[in-house]
Structures are given as C-alpha cells and as structure tokens.
Amino acid sequence: MRNTSEPVAAAGGAGMTTAVVQERYGAEPEAVLRMARLVRPEIGPDEVLVRVRASSVDRGTWHMMAGLPYAVRPVSGLRRPKLPNPGRNIAGVVEAIGSGVTGFAPGDEVYGTAAAAFADYATARPDRIAPKPAGLTFEEAATVPVSALTSLQAVRDKGRVREGQEVLITGAAGGVGTFAVQLAHAFGARVTAVASTPKLDAVRSLGADHVIDYTREDFLAAPRHYDVIIDIAGNRGLRELRRALTPRGRLVITGGETNGVWLGGTDRQLRAQLLSPFTGRHLGAFISSEHADGLRDLTSLIDAGMLSPVVDRVYPLTETAAAVRHLLDGRVTGKLALTVPAE
C-alpha cells in the first residue's frame, strides 16, 4: 500500500487522523488503497467518536472497494466511493460523545460497526456499538461484529437451529462460517461442516461433529438429510440443496459468489425466496443487520465461553491492502484483523 503524508483535506487547528483512503473503485487492493492524513471526523449530536484500536476485513470489504457487483453502488456510490475507505468493523475506546448520546462515556471500550473504519478515528452510531467483551483483545473483538452478527442471524433467527437438529454449514472455515459452526453447536445441533483439506481440523475443533472435504467429496451426494442448511460459500443449485433437506427443512443462503458483475450470485438468493412458497421447505436468504442488541447477545455468548473469534493473522493498518489480498487468495481460516497502534 502506498503511503503519503499529504492530507486529502485540511483545516486550521483541526485534529488529524491517519486513514486508509480510496478515491476510486478497483478490484486490486494495491491499486486503490493508500494511506493518508485526513482531518479528524466531527460527530453530530447523536454520534460517538471512537479512537479505533483495531478493525478487520471481510468479503464485504472487497465488494465495497471494487464496487461489485454493481448492485452495491446505489449504497456505496454510483461512480466513485462515497466513503473514504471500505472499513466497517471497529474495536476501540470512546473519545467523545454527541450531546444527545446516553449510555456511553469517554474512555469506554467498545466494539461494533462504523463507516470508514480503516482509520485511527471513526464516528459510530450508538445503536451499532456495545461494550467490548472483557476477555477479548481489541484485535479479536474487531473481527466479531459483521461476521458474527451475520452468523447469529443465519443460525438463530433464520435457521431457527435448535437442540437435536442436523445442520450442514458450507464455507465453515471462513469468517462467517467459523462463528456459525460454534453457534449451531452451542444451540445443541449436530453440525456437519464443509471445508477444504487444510482447514478440516480447525472446524472440527470449533464443535463440528462431522467434517466433509469438498475437494474430495460431494457434500450433497450422500443420502443424509439436514434440518437446516446454512449455505455460506456454496454455489450449488437450489434443486440439489432442496433435496438435501428434510421435508420441513430450512435453507438459509448467506453467501455464494459468482463472477457476475451485476448481481454477483444474489440471483440465486432471489430465486430461493421466490421458490419457497411452492415447496414445504423454507428456502430463503437475508441481508444481515447491524445493531447493538445483537452485539450484546454475542457478548453474552463470548463471556459464557460458547463463542470465540478465530483470528488467522493480524496486519498493521498500513498493510490493509495486503490483508485484503490475503483474503482474496482464499487461504484464510477465520478472520483477518487490522491493528491500529495507540498514540
């Protein structure tokens, strides 16, 4: 990642922040992400300023960086990014609060989501942050919000996983998958996890009762049927997935990438929802939501020892482009964190 000391904006006497900057869309992180000095963001009456101590990257980071599929651009910016950088996850310390904010005070350690999180200061909404789990480092906590909230909503809210059920999880070694395996196990299900050869031991250690190496075995070929399928990284057809469900089973599609620049695989999710009313099985997808209630639920699970982030590697903020490249290479087990040194 290219470094520069030239600020993108300047204001006399204003505090400054070190941040990753993206001024255009592009699929190659080394080409579009750089370091810069910016004017520290100002907060409104209903916002919190967080001194960021750590962040993390996920697949959504790349989508926002690349502006792909094009369906994301009404949110991220039609021709160029609306935000300085594609970061979303934060863990850090409250620096200041707006006049209308209650429940937080300067000095509080928090985690959650914020816009433009790849910086040493970021503004956050109070309803999207929560007290940081005491047992986690900042780097560990920063890997939780987006991925674990997605997993919680997929497993608990959409999949309705409960004790004694048979649950299949594809993409089980990824950022969302490692949390999903733990959650399904914590809710008492028998978990079958799908991953590649080098990652089987890792997902087994998270509570999977059975693991399938998708490079050597078709995980849908066996006559086994599942009460719930959490499809995170799969691209299998809906007919095949439906056949692997029990008569009243539930399919929850949370991912599945294609090279399509317009929909990028979301068409499969849309078709699942359209097909669902015509079958006894529940076929569906969802867009995860970011909120403090979910973060507090995750904190309870973490504090109880039922959920723990799997951190593959920690990069300094200055190497954000390298972290995104590592993610794209597909060799990550769990999450990649970014650390932001304290002043």
Image (cartoon, rainbow, N blue to C red):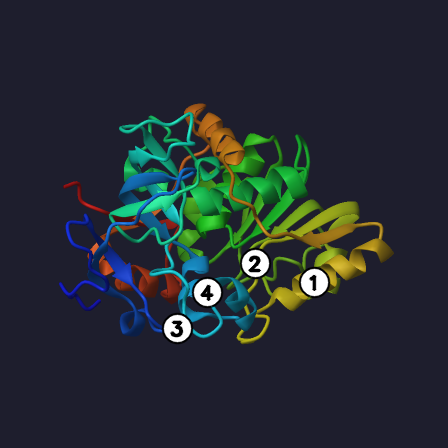
Q: In which quarter of the image is the N terminus?
A: bottom left
Q: Are marks 3 and 4 in contact (CB under 8 Å)?
A: no
The percent position of residue 107, horizontal first and vertical second, equals 27, 28
Local SS, label 3: loop
Q: Which amino acid does label 3 sit on?
A: Tyr
Check disc 4 and report the residue beneath it.
63
Q: Which of marks 2 and 3 is in front?
A: 3
Q: Is residue 10 left or right of residue 275?
A: left
Q: Which quadrant holds residue 21? A: bottom left
Q: Nearer the viewer, mark 1 or mark 3?
A: 3
For the residues labelled 4 and 2, say whether their Cβ atoms are less than 8 Å apart.
no
User: Percent x, y for residue 80?
Assistant: 41, 72
Q: How crowded is mark 1: few (under 14 residues within 10 Å), some or many (20 or more)?
A: some
Nearest the viewer among 173 and 259 is: 259
At label 2, the amino acid type is Gly
User: Could you tell me which residue is drawn at 19 percent across and 49 percent down?
Assistant: 14
Residue 6 or residue 177, whichever sits in front: 6
Element type at mark 4 = helix
- Could you classify mark 4 by the number of other residues whose Cα lies within 10 Å: few (under 14), some (14-19), or many (20 or more)? many
Determine which residue is flagged by label 2. 255
Whole-number angstrom distance, CA of label 2 to CA of label 3? 22 Å
Q: What element carries label 1?
A: helix
What residue would you read off at disc 1? Answer: 270
In terms of image quadrants, where is residue 307?
top left
Secondary structure of the residue carrying tag 2 is loop
Looking at marks 2 and 3 on the same chain, the residue that comes earlier in the sequence is marked by 3
Amino acid type of the residue tagged 4 in the rendering: His
Q: Which residue carries the number 3 mark?
A: 25
User: Mark 1 or mark 3: which comes first in sequence?
Assistant: 3
Task: Indicate the position of residue 13 as horizontal and vertical percent values.
Answer: 15, 49
The span from disc 1 to disc 3 (Cα, nearest Å) is 26 Å
**In the drawing, does residue 273 fall left or right of residue 177?**
right
